[in-house]
Image (spheres, rainbow, N blue to C red):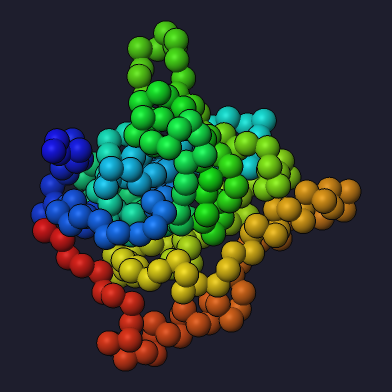
Amino acid sequence: MPDLLKKYKQMRDFGDTPEPSGAKTKKKTKLPLFVIQKHDATRLHYDFRLEMEGVLKSWAVPKGPSYDPSIKRLAMMTEDHPYDYASFEGVIPADNYGAGNVIIWDQGTWELIEPGDDPVKALAGGKLTFRLYGKKMFGEWALVKIKGRSTGKDNEWLLLKHRDAYANDKVDVTEVAPRSVVSNLLVEEVGPENVWISNRKAASRKPPTLASRLTKTKKTTTAKRPPRRATPSPAASARSRSSRAAAPRSARPTPRRRLR
Ligand code: MN
């Protein structure tokens, strides 16, 4: 089997960056996983990753996703990332590839809608429509490869929202929900001292509230209220903060692994 992560590994020094080395392989889950990592590198972008073939197919989306179906967001395909990169949140040290802070902006599962039932084939064909089950990302989305461009680039795709119950041209999801879904930190708040890798299952968390917000906002477009910040409920944030601060060591989330 070809090493899909060869390029990923060549580009990094795992003695120097806390990013996963790709040595571990994935555990079985029902639906494949997706993650969007907000990455404050030389240029801020959102790394959109879909699990396929045991690795994470990856696109860098400079402006992040938009729920407005009329907006197409440029998504530059990048090298495959290892499966366990999905739980990486932290700081890529200076002088390393992609140096800068990373938060897990959203995560969940995804499923292919069309074409066919083989995502790898769909990817090779340059177009896939899929459904996302995240905490911020819901409904039908598509990735479409840009063809016939004279730029000479072969990695340019568009990420776009399909029209469905979640489509919304009033709520800017990157604006209203900027925080990490695992630590509740903003990307600029992540530091080496508060980094951790979550192994918690999505099911152990509270159900998303952004979904109802998106559909509600759409129905009350005449109200013209300024958007409220999407902060988690006080109960949720108190729970995660206090449980980490006060719980005995054994009850804390799995400590961050030092990867060499
Ligand atoms: Mn990145």
* Residue at the far right in the pictured view: 222
Let me know if residue 187 appears in the view: no
Left or right: where 135 falls relative to 37: right
Position in image of residue 115 (x %, y %)? 48, 31
* Residue at the far front in the pictured view: 116
Position in image of residue 204 (x %, y %)? 46, 74
Let me know if residue 3 appears in the view: yes
In this view, the residue in front, 150 or 195, is 150
Q: Residue at x 57, y 34 (%)?
A: 160
Image quadrant in which you'd find residue 81: top left
Position in image of residue 159 (x %, y %)? 52, 34
Q: Residue at x 26, y 74 (%)?
A: 255
Left or right: where 78 falls relative to 45: left
The correct choice, above or below, for 202 with respect to 13 in the image is below
Position in image of residue 61 (x %, y %)? 45, 37
* Picture mark count: 0
Image quadrant in which you'd find residue 98: top left
In this view, the residue in front, 40 or 20, is 20
Which quarter of the image is occupied by the C terminus?
A: bottom left
The correct choice, above or below, for 72 with respect to 136 in the image is above
Left or right: where 121 falls relative to 113: left
Q: Residue at x 63, y 31 (%)?
A: 71
Q: Residue at x 41, y 54 (%)?
A: 31
Which quarter of the image is occupied by the N terminus?
A: top left
